[in-house]
Amino acid sequence: MPATLAFGFHESNRGEYLAQYFLSALGVSAPVIRQEDIGVDFFCSLAREENKKLTFHSPYMVQQGAADAKEFIYGGYTDKGKWRGEGVEWLFSQELPLFACITDREKARFRLYSTSAMWLVCYQFGTMTQIELCPDEHHDPLKESRGDRIGKEGHGDGFEYRVPLGNPVVDLDIFQLTKDNRQQAIQALTIAINVEQTNLTFRRLGVYVASWFNEVKPNDPASLAVRGGSVFWNGECGKNVPPQIDSLKNIAVTLALNLHEQGDADKLAHLAPVFRLFDKHAIPPWIMEKLPRIVMDNIA
């Protein structure tokens, strides 16, 4: 209807404006226009000042919500009982670090949370029926995230999960946007982005290792040195093994060439038996001809 706008819709817009103001204080932030909004509100990069010029680094994404109003829920069911499985698939298929943001318009406050703990839950439990990212919660992600059964198998595993995001990596109000505070926040966020990018790299390699922050102090880079983490495996014969062997092959080939070129015969001798895992047809001929003899002797 002309000349009208739903109040809640307008207030939601104000929250996104506030988030944009804070994110732009940390670097550059490009809001996703509403027609293209599929779950991410901002694409961002951090800023670094060098010789009175800004350079940009560490790209990341942000999903924004309002204090006491937003729930970061993926999956679950529609009112008609249809499973929203695509939401769970979307969450774990991103190629950039994803952060959850809470804005408080009354206090002009901005909080930004790492979502890295979600990987522990994903690798431990597999495809979930519903997952909720929970800012300011601190329970054990592996032992205490699983909740009630809400659906049937085939729609994920049938259970809902609550993933603790812990304390915010960045927590600022409008009066704290001094240069020193912003630099501290940028340094802390840089660490969090790098850790999540490592998690994404391991996911691409098919190596189920993940790190997360369990003792974060907002805007404190030193606190992000304390991390939790886990490695995951599967007892089903052959499960996850082929992509892991393929990833290992690429690392082993590169390492072997480095060790050979650097003349480190001892380490090369220890590495060579690993090549028994690899099929020679999986290694391109132009690489095979460069490999040292001790390695070639171990390739099937």
Image (tube, rainbow, N blue to C red):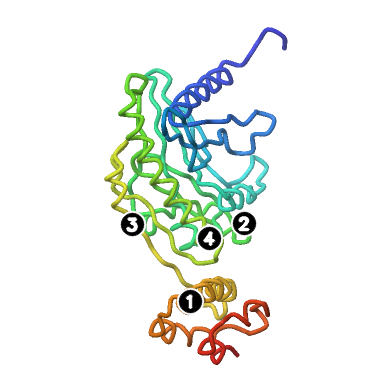
Q: Are marks 3 and 1 in contact (CB under 8 Å)?
A: no
The label number, if any, that marks residue 261 in the structure image: 1
Question: Which badge, 1 or 4, is on the more N-terminal residue?
Answer: 4
Q: Which amino acid does label 3 sit on?
A: Gly
Residue 225 pos. (x, y %): 30, 51
Q: Are marks 1 and 4 in contact (CB under 8 Å)?
A: no
Question: Which residue is pictured at 59% across the width and 75% down the height?
Answer: 242
How far apart are the alpha carbons under marks 3 and 2?
30 Å
> Which residue is nearer to you in this view: 82 or 94?
94
Which residue position is annotated with label 3?
A: 228
Image quadrant holding the N terminus, namely top right
Mark 1, residues whose alpha carbon is within 10 Å: few (<14), some, or many (≥20)? few
Mark 4, residues whose alpha carbon is within 10 Å: few (<14), some, or many (≥20)? some
Question: Which badge, 3 or 4, is on the more N-terminal residue?
Answer: 4
Q: Is residue 188 left or right of residue 248?
A: left
Q: Do the residues labelled 4 and 2 touch (CB within 8 Å)?
A: no
Number of numbered discs on residues: 4
Residue 128 pos. (x, y %): 54, 56
- Residue lying furthest top: 3
Which residue position is annotated with label 2?
A: 155
Q: Quadrant of residue 140?
A: bottom left
Mark 3, residues whose alpha carbon is within 10 Å: few (<14), some, or many (≥20)? few
